[in-house]
Image (tube, rainbow, N blue to C red):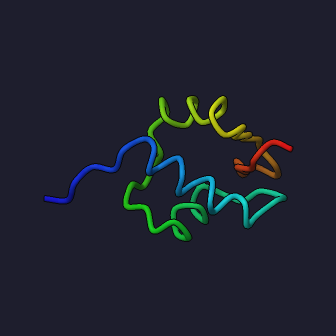
Amino acid sequence: MKAKMSYEAFCDAVEKVLKNYPEGTTWTQVRKDAKLSQKWPNNKWVRRMDEDIGLIREVVKGQTIWRLGK
């Protein structure tokens, strides 16, 4: 059984990927680049990242785009 990822490790992985996409990208791309196993992100963690790393999620042309705040 694979060990579960901690919030800190997840947050660091997402932030590292998003730094490569200043205009933002989709969760699917974040998951692929960070080699994350979960199909969908933990909603509590995502909301926590709004404050912790300035995560912004916005719908653009029907897709939710993730990016870091300025």
Q: Residue at x 48, y 29 (%)?
A: 44
Q: Residue at x 55, y 37 (%)?
A: 46
Residue 36 percent coordinates (x, y): 43, 61
Is 13 situated above or below 57? below
Residue 32 percent coordinates (x, y): 52, 69
Residue 13 percent coordinates (x, y): 53, 57
**Which residue is at the front of the view, 27 or 17?**
17
Quadrant position of residue 19: bottom right
The quarter of the picture where the N terminus appears is bottom left
Residue 15 percent coordinates (x, y): 63, 53
Q: Does 32 sit left or right of 55 as displayed?
A: left
Q: Which residue is drawn at 20% across and 59% down?
A: 2
Q: Does 40 sit left or right of 58 as displayed?
A: left
The quarter of the picture where the C terminus appears is top right
Q: Residue furthest left?
A: 1
Q: Does 26 sit left or right of 69 as displayed?
A: left
Total numbered labels = 0
Q: Does 1 sit left or right of 12 as displayed?
A: left
**Which residue is at the front of the view, 45 or 70?**
70
Is 8 situated above or below 17? above
Q: Residue at x 27, y 49 (%)?
A: 4
